[in-house]
Image: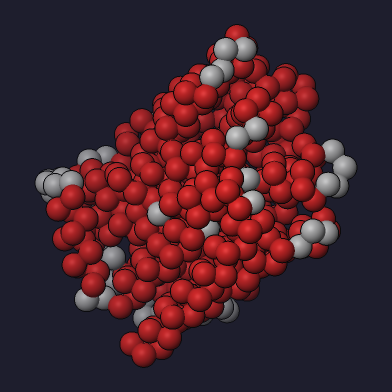
Amino acid sequence: MNPLPQNPLAASGSFAAMKSVPYRLQFTAYVLAMMADNIEHLISYWVVFQKFHSPALAGFAVLSHWLPFLLFSVAVGGLADRFDPRRIIQCGMVLFIVASSGWGFFFLTDTIQMWHAMLLLVIHGCAGVLWQTPNQLLLYDLVGPADLPSAVRLNAMARYLGILVGPAVGGIIMLSLGTSHGIIFNTLFYLPMLLWLFWAPMRDKSIAMRRFAVRGLADIVLTMRAIGTQPVLSAMTWLAGLTSFMIGNAYHAQMPGFAGDLGHGDPGVSYSMLLAADAAGALLAGIALESWGRLKGTPRTAIMLAMCWSGALLGFALVRIYPAAIVLLFCAGFFELSFNTMAQALVQLNAPSDIRGRVVGLYNMAGLGMRAFSGITVGLSGAAIGIHWSLGLSAAVLLAGLCLLYRRRVREA
């Protein structure tokens, strides 16, 4: 592998990864798949909320979506170290299609029960874990090391572009086709990624031929020991774990409740606008970071941005004025993408090449898997003390934890 530049996070120019044709194709397919993911969330969360009015089920939606990342991210990373990541991603796309088709069947027949919803949410969560870590490793096959930070940022921007476009497209689909036919139609958006991967570039054969054993729990322990001696990797993994454990994206599943409490016009429109504001802030952050390119990527900067994110969500939990809530969610989206992409780029650039999949998998276990517990801190506790209190307290505790992490990082520097 080519040596990394001295300051890799500032090595590439604006939108440098877009110079690669395979990366541009991946970016387009990723946006469509992420859009489909969020259309499914929009339609299924809305129908399930209207039918069951259960904050506990909304909390389970978070648990089921992220618990597979906690349990299987390192194992999937190990598989991606050993086998072709393209085929693992395709398995994830197939499961996404199964989940959307299942929702459509139950909506069409009006036979949806709570256990049906729980099963489909679990299938959707398993699809996600088969997609994300292998897709991050696929970036190494599409761009060179110098352009990797750009690819990481752009893929994060693609994620939020899907979140931004998803509610709008999902709303149009719901109005024109209805929830039942609309969520079945949504399966078509997964096909570009599924099909493109048959022709996507293959990884370096010298890496692909390595036969690392996949050892389950032992892989997690060994990978944790490996990054324990590297301050950058350990700090960014701690950052990912703290932010995901305390908040993650659990407030998205509770957004119908926030929309109703804010009481601004039609709840369905308010719900979509709140999600769109969060995504719009993230999209702007991606464009700004790619265009400007002067924000130095360091662990301390990433932690400070995460502190700003927790502060914005604390304000959102306390405010009862709809325009102010929109502004705060916009700011939250901006800071979330900024610290997440910076942390992810630092991890991918500093991960040892021989265990890269496991290191990225461990980071995803912390950054995505720990979101399962945010279903308790924000979701299930919301049923007991109210969603505003649960989010506000979680944000306040997170802010305190990030302050301690920042002080520790300052001492290590």
> Based on the displayed image, in which of its 4 quarters is residue 229 positioned?
bottom left
Of the pair 387 and 231, the residue shown nearer to us = 387
Badge count: 0
Q: Is residue 320 above or below residue 94?
A: below
Res. 364 image quadrant: bottom left
Q: Is residue 410 visible?
A: yes
Residue at the (77%, 37%) spot, across then down: 268
Rendered position, 219 above or below 31: below
- In-image side of 125 versus 263 (left or right): left
Q: Position of residue 246 (x, y in %)?
A: 49, 60
Where residue 51 sits: x, y (%)?
65, 25
Q: Which residue occupies 49% across, 39% down? A: 60
Q: Which colour scheme is used?
A: secondary structure
367 to the left or right of 46: left
Q: Position of residue 95 (x, y in %)?
A: 42, 27
Q: Quadrant of the N terminus?
A: bottom left
**Which residue is situated farthest in the top direction here?**
109
Side of 151 relative to 396 (left or right): left
| Furthest residue in direction front, as rendered | 384
The answer, for residue 199, to whether it is visible in the render is no
**Which quadrant is the C terminus positioned in?**
bottom left
* Residue at the spot 58% in from the left edge and 48% down from the top edge: 384
Residue 262 percent location from the top left of the image: 80, 50
- Near-viewer residue (289 or 117): 117
Q: Residue at x 42, y 68 (%)?
A: 239
Q: Does 47 appear above or below 335? A: above
